[in-house]
Amino acid sequence: MTAHSPHEKPQDRWYRVDRLGGLRRFAAAITVFNLLGHTWFGFEQSWAHPFAGLAAAYGMELLLELLQCGIEWRRPRFLSGGAQQFVDFFLPAQISGLACSMLLYSSDRLMPIVFAAAMAIGSKHVFRVQAGGASRHFYNPSNFGITLTLLLFPWVGISPPYHFTENLTGWGDWFVPGFIIVSGTFLNTRFTRRLPLILAWLAGFIAQAGLRCLLFDTQLTAALLPMTGVAFILYTFYMVTDPPTTPSGKAAQVAFGLSVAATYGLLMIAHVVFGLFFALTLVSTVRGVYLFIRSRAAGRQQTARRQQPSESAAASPHHAPMTQEPAIARGSDL
């Protein structure tokens, strides 16, 4: 690991060590998983699907970056450093392109995958709010692209659960999900620090299954059955825990995880399919609206505080205010 400067800001070190470290490992993991899936595990999609998703994600990321550079009159980020900087720039596109092609099933048609990957990358540039002193996106890109595709193309579905381990037998049926759990736990403990969110999501999922069993006569085993699938494990460790689009505070993480589980339960009661993806999109929408309202309120407070000294000076010209303008507190990260 590269030694850091003593003058390096904490947020810069977090980006360099934690965020980039997590992105690199996640991109490598999903790439290897797709390669094994198409050669060994039994993925139903053709080889053309992941390449179509990657091409769409890379193309959209490149196009939007060049457009932004033209507006801001700056150098493209993928040309601002060496080869490592170039590779790091396309890591999110690598993840979104492969995730959309892996989790969506569109038979032999490629355009739904192209659409999902393009919308996933586009959502990062369109749906943004001010949070923590910076502009950030609030939708998980892959989840947003999948959700929008499922809504607009009813004949597109989610990949069948069996295809993640279709060609595996015996120990292979246990090794693949076990390895994902171990690696996902390490990634979210060491880099994303989203373990409280994962535990809250799992506890909430079990709770909503129990409530549906008590109130709506749902079989408990059927309500808990999704937890045994590889898709659920991938969702738990690699989608619902996306660091840029989830809270960082422990209490806020717990609230976010429980909210996703509760929303999923309500969708199941309403007989809405693909509840995992829709639940995360709905909760992220509510969080995005909250962050937008909070940032607007903070902006108005800052404007009022800046105007207050001048108004006081105008009222008392012989007594200039002695207090310094207070900084706006960041507040809870929700």
Image (cartoon, grey):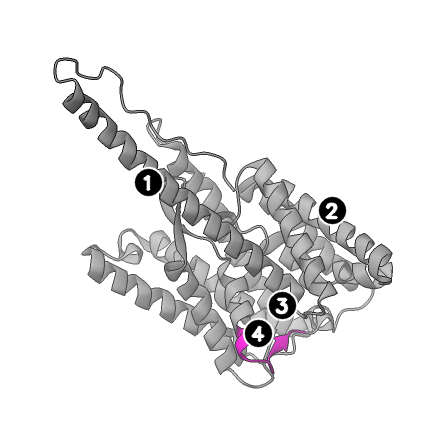
Residue 14: percent from left, percent from top: 44, 38
Q: Name the element at disc 1.
A: helix
Q: Earlier in the sequence, mark 3 or mark 2?
A: 3
Q: Earlier in the sequence, mark 4 or mark 2?
A: 4
Q: Which residue is the site of mark 1?
A: 299
Q: Is residue 157 left or right of residue 166?
A: left
Instruction: Name the residue at the front extreme.
Output: 315
Question: What amino acid is at disc 1?
Answer: Gly
Instruction: Assign the N terminus to one quadrant of the image.
Output: top left
- Residue sitting at 47 percent across and 52 percent down? 288
Which stretch did the figure color magenta?
149-159
Q: Name the element at disc 4.
A: helix
Residue 193 found in image quarter: top right
Of the residues tagged 2 and 1, which is closer to the observer? 1
Residue 245: percent from left, percent from top: 50, 51
Q: Which residue is the site of mark 3?
A: 36
- Residue sitting at 59 percent across and 42 percent down? 253
Asked whether 139 or 323 is in front, the reply is 323
**For the residues marked 4 and 2, what is the alpha-carbon distance in whole angstroms?**
27 Å
Q: Is residue 171 visible?
A: no
Residue 228: percent from left, percent from top: 77, 60
Residue 274 found in image quarter: bottom right
**For the residues marked 3 and 4, what is the alpha-carbon distance in whole angstroms?**
26 Å
Q: Which residue is the site of mark 2?
A: 203
Of the residues tagged 3 and 4, which is closer to the observer? 4
Check the image and report above or below for 74 versus 146: above
Asked whether the residues under the numbered discs 4 and 2 touch, taking CB atoms below 8 Å apart as contact, a structural biologist would say no
Q: Earlier in the sequence, mark 3 or mark 1?
A: 3
Asked whether the residues under the numbered discs 1 and 4 touch, taking CB atoms below 8 Å apart as contact, a structural biologist would say no
Q: Which residue is the site of mark 4?
A: 150
Badge 3: few (under 14), some or many (20 or more) residues near its Cα, within 10 Å?
A: some
Badge 1: few (under 14), some or many (20 or more) residues near its Cα, within 10 Å?
A: few
